[in-house]
Image: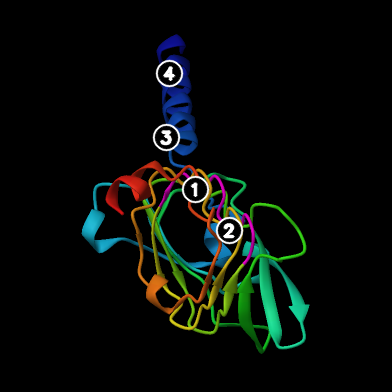
């Protein structure tokens, strides 16, 4: 009888360890966003994120559309690429950050991440990417005309902004503390 009880307890303990070790629950961020593993980096757990839910970020309405005011990455997830939508709730995304407020919209970008800005965006506000240590590339944004004060401050890994030639109003201090940027440019 003792042997049966010990065997039964061993099986129960083994099953509970297996169940606990294989958590199949995903965070609400990953389940509400369209995400897929990066084909070029199969060995990592990084994801490509395409926003399709208002749960992933905060935004404010303005006269000509909406502006993204905050990137909700409270779980510190590392993404290879974040693709910002061109439209939210039927309104065009026209800006990243609010020129009237100084805070970090995309400060929670981790890993080695490219952020793709939609061509509907005409400006990136003050401090919008400040402290985004994982930001390595900013692309898209072909109609972006303004980049504000300290927009990329301390983005130490930022190496490339593909649409800078189109920007007509670039703050002198937009790249303050961007050590990699300054060494390349």
Mark 4 vs mark 1, CA separation in Å: 45 Å
* Residue at 41% from the left image edge and 70% from the top image edge: 164
Q: Secondary structure at mark 1?
A: loop
Which is closer to the viewer, label 4 or label 3?
3
Q: Earlier in the sequence, mark 3 or mark 2?
A: 3
Marked residue nearer the N-terminal end (4 or 3): 4
Q: Residue at x 46, y 10 (%)?
A: 2
Task: Identify the residue at image location x=55%, y=55%.
Answer: 129
What stretch of residues is rendered in magenta?
Answer: 125-135
Q: Please, which residue is most extreme toward the top here?
A: 2
Distance (Cα) linking label 4 and label 2: 45 Å
Residue 45, visible in the rendered structure: no
Where residue 76 appears, as percent x and y from the top left, is 53, 44
Neighbor class of circle 1 (other Cα within 10 Å; few <14, some 14-19, many 20+) is some
| Marking on residue 18 | 3
Where residue 115 appears, as percent x and y from the top left, is 44, 63
Residue designated by label 1: 77
For the stretch drawn in magenta, what is the main secondary structure?
Answer: loop
Q: CA distance from mark 4 to mark 3?
A: 21 Å
Label 3 – label 2 distance at C-alpha: 25 Å
Instruction: Give the residue pinned by disc 2.
Output: 29
Residue 155 visible? The answer is yes
The residue at which mark 4 appears reads as 4
Q: CA distance from mark 1 to mark 2?
A: 9 Å
Dot 1 or dot 2: first in sequence order is 2
SS type, badge 3: helix
- Which tag, 4 or 2, sits closer to the chain's start? 4
Nearest to viewer (mark 4 / mark 1): 1
Q: Pointer 3 and pointer 2: residues touching (CB < 8 Å)?
A: no
Circles 1, 2 touching at the beta carbon (< 8 Å): yes
Mark 2 neighbour density, 10 Å: few (under 14) some (14–19) many (20 or more): some
């Amino acid at each position: 009888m003792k042997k049966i009880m010990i065997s039964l307890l061993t099986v129960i303990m083994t099953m509970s360890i297996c169940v606990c070790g294989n958590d199949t629950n995903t965070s609400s961020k990953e389940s509400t966003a369209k995400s897929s593993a990066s084909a070029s980096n199969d060995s990592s757990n990084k994801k490509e994120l395409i926003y399709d839910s208002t749960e992933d970020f905060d935004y404010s309405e303005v006269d000509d559309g909406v502006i993204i005011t905050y990137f909700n990455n409270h779980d510190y997830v590392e993404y290879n690429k974040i693709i910002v939508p061109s439209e939210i709730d039927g309104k065009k995304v026209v800006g990243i950050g609010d020129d009237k407020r100084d805070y970090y919209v995309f400060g929670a970008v981790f890993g080695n991440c490219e952020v793709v800005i939609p061509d509907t965006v005409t400006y990136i506000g003050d401090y919008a990417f400040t402290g985004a240590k994982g930001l390595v590339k900013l692309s898209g944004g072909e109609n972006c005309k303004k980049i504000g004060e300290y927009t990329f401050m301390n983005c130490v890994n930022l190496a490339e902004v593909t649409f800078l030639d189109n920007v007509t109003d670039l703050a002198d201090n937009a790249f303050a503390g961007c050590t990699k940027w300054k060494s390349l440019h």
